[in-house]
Image (spheres, rainbow, N blue to C red):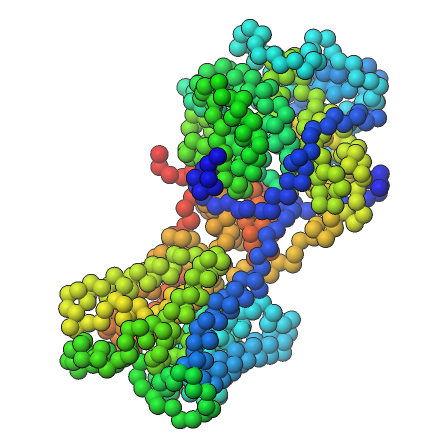
Amino acid sequence: MSSGKNERLIVSPSPHIAGDETIPKLMYAVLYALIPAAVVSILFFGLDGLRVLLLSSLFCLLVEYLIMRFMLGRSSTLADGSALITGLLLGFNLPSNLPAWMIFSGAVVAIGVAKLTFGGLGRNPFNPALVGRVFLLISFPAQMTTWPLPRFLNFSWGEDAVTGATAISVVKEGLKQGESMDSLLAKLPSLIDLILGATGGSIGEVSAIALLAGGLYLLFKKVISWHIPVSYLLTVAVITGVIWLIDPTKSASPLFHLFTGGLMLGAFFMATDYVSTPMSAKGQLVYGVGCGVLTVVIRLYGAYPEGVSFAILLMNATTPLINNSFKPARFGHQAA
Amino acid sequence: MKSAKSLSSFRLGGIHPPENKLSATSPILDLPLPALVTIPVTQNLGAPAKVIVKKGDAVLVGQIIAAAGGFVSANTHSSVSGTVAKITDEVDSSGYKRPTITIKVEGDDWIEGVDLSDALVTDLGLTNQEMMERIVTAGIVGLGGAAFPSHVKLTPPKGKSCDVLIINGVECEPYLTADHRLMLEQGAELIVGIKILMQLLNSSRAVIGIENNKRDAIKQLEQLLESESGIEVTPLKVQYPQGGEKQLINATIGKEVPAGALPIEVGAVVHNVGTIVAIYHAVMKGRPLVERIITVTGKKITKPANFRVRIGTPVSHLIEAVGGLPMGSGKVINGGPMMGRALTTLDAPVVKGSSGILVMDGSESIRREAVACIRCAKCIDSCPMGLAPYLLKIWGERSELERAEDELVMDCIECGSCSFTCPANLPLLDYIRLAKQGVGRMLRERSKS
């Protein structure tokens, strides 16, 4: 009991309550969503896959800690979870036999250059994991495109694995040589295997189904909205679908395009990165379509077999412009 | 009962904060009179009222002590009988000092001509003009919080007409239950009040919008309206800010009030349920607005309650009535947690626009530390006006007023959904208010030159 006369009251403007969403919660939701794909990659690429994921995560955390602590003299930001996501995503984008020092240099570029030079979380114009990945791809093209083939539940360590091309580059090269689509498909794992992830490729991108499960979890948890993944995937499906309908002997089906390469990983986890993507729903749709068009153009006509990373990074660059041009749907401003 | 899916709501944004309607089952209690009441001279939006009593005057309940200072203004009445102790500037619920009349309470003697019985009066055969005069005399203002003089809203501008009267029984603010209890306990009076307004506005249709978390009130009113025509109850999705005027119009009749325009532009007039019951009392009982229903609540309050309380009662009197301020209390809010104002003193009085007193524990009262924006766009998704709060915050912070204006900062209804939602704990609305103030100043200067 008190008369209230001498109470010291806290005064601040409304609102006086806040929701329970925090940045670490959102970041950890993304990490949970990556678990199925991580599990599949360990099932298929064994301890080598685990090694890459651990090293990449560890290096990214280390680089973030060292730079924040000793170069910028700020408090550690490891707890927000964003460096761990970048580490895991970078690892997802690497072949399972990449040497540790290359992974480390990728982490330095991802966290040090792409993220912290711009001011850290929230200020990086490009997706850090993708910048790290593309840096490695351009610097070490041979190592970055030599894919150990998956060996289901083989947990031997460091054994020289059989390597091979990814499904998407087999098709691209074969079509260039004039082979028919049917004979190319005969050389490849079945579509079911491609969807499950029993195929050569970056360790985290092979299993479309595991990535889809994680992506749906993010949608369900409202961590991401549907606009970017749906417009991205739909654009790829529609363009490759039209081309395939015109001549199915000389082109891969839209299903093949959807379930191979880095598309699922890109559409649900890379193109939806908060910081580097547009804010409004309309802007996100435009962005997703842009990613889709660029991905298909690079896949079909570019020098690289896969275009997801480049497409997303290029669209990252357009984000400020899209934000300026596509405002949120306004209330009370419709022409009657 | 409609299923949750088919419930109407507004078109854009919105959030769902924990409802915490702790006092929903507490019947309205009459609070005993305090020893002193402090009645702010002006309790309405618009022109200030003029004091017409002086120190030492004896006053009765319902006696006008400050007269309306124009058309957009309202009379202020004594809520008790007693002696005017002083007329001074006192800190009110806004935190500012305002002209205030302090009255020593000596009794509960009313002015002549007020029907104090509980009997429901449905018709006195008054003309429209007589009814309007009674509303003006009674000093009725919007009791939902804005305190806009009600008779102004009942006088549509030339060439406009009210096709539908919308009754705001939404009460979307967490914790508050005053309107809920009013609808349950005074539904019959509410309906007579609605008919008065329909007659005055010459409107054949009325819609009562109620959030679906008050099913007992919805059922009660539907039963009372069974034999009536022209008045419908629309259960609404529990979504904040469902009770925002533009949001409620959008949810109930599907129309969108253009930016900068009044509801009458789309043929609607909106009144809060409490206001309508006050209008019933003014017209049918000759009773001025001297009391209102107010929720006194909080997680640490042992018996959250709804009181019928005289205007001018100090907040401390209300808090004592529910067992006193709990140990470790941090904030005391006049209103709800989303749009209410934190009080600077518990001596502040209940005014016409006070809908609740919310006591928050110290641990709930401190804001979380703000970190950098990660551009998650959740503020955009939550904004019921379709604004980009993250951007308005930047322009507010940098005093880039033209850019804030271009981004429609003046459309902001200050509901606080953006700040509530922000995972970086950014005080978005603080900066948006700054921007609004600056742009408002700029617009006034522009119109002068």
Q: Residue at x 44, y 69 (%)?
A: A127
Task: Please determine whether, in this image, residue A204 is positioned above or below residue B438.
Answer: below
Q: Quadrant of residue A312?
A: bottom left
Q: Residue furthest top?
A: B125
x then y, percent, for residue B88: 79, 27
Q: Position of residue B2 (x, y in %)?
A: 46, 36
Residue A147 picture location, percent across and down = 36, 85
Residue at image coords 55%, 34% = B215
Is residue A266 toward the left or the right of residue B49 in the image?
left
What residue sits 41% from the left and 50% below the top? A327
Q: Horizontally, is B257 left or right of B315 in the view?
A: left
For the residue pair A82 and A202, the one nearer the viewer reads as: A202
On the image, which quarter does residue B288 sit in? top right
In this picture, is B393 found above or below A52? above
Of residues B330 and B74, the one drawn nearer to the viewer in this rendering: B330
Depicted B436 relative to depicted B125: above or below = below
Residue A193, image x and y in percent?
Answer: 32, 76
Which quadrant of the structure image shows residue B273?
top right
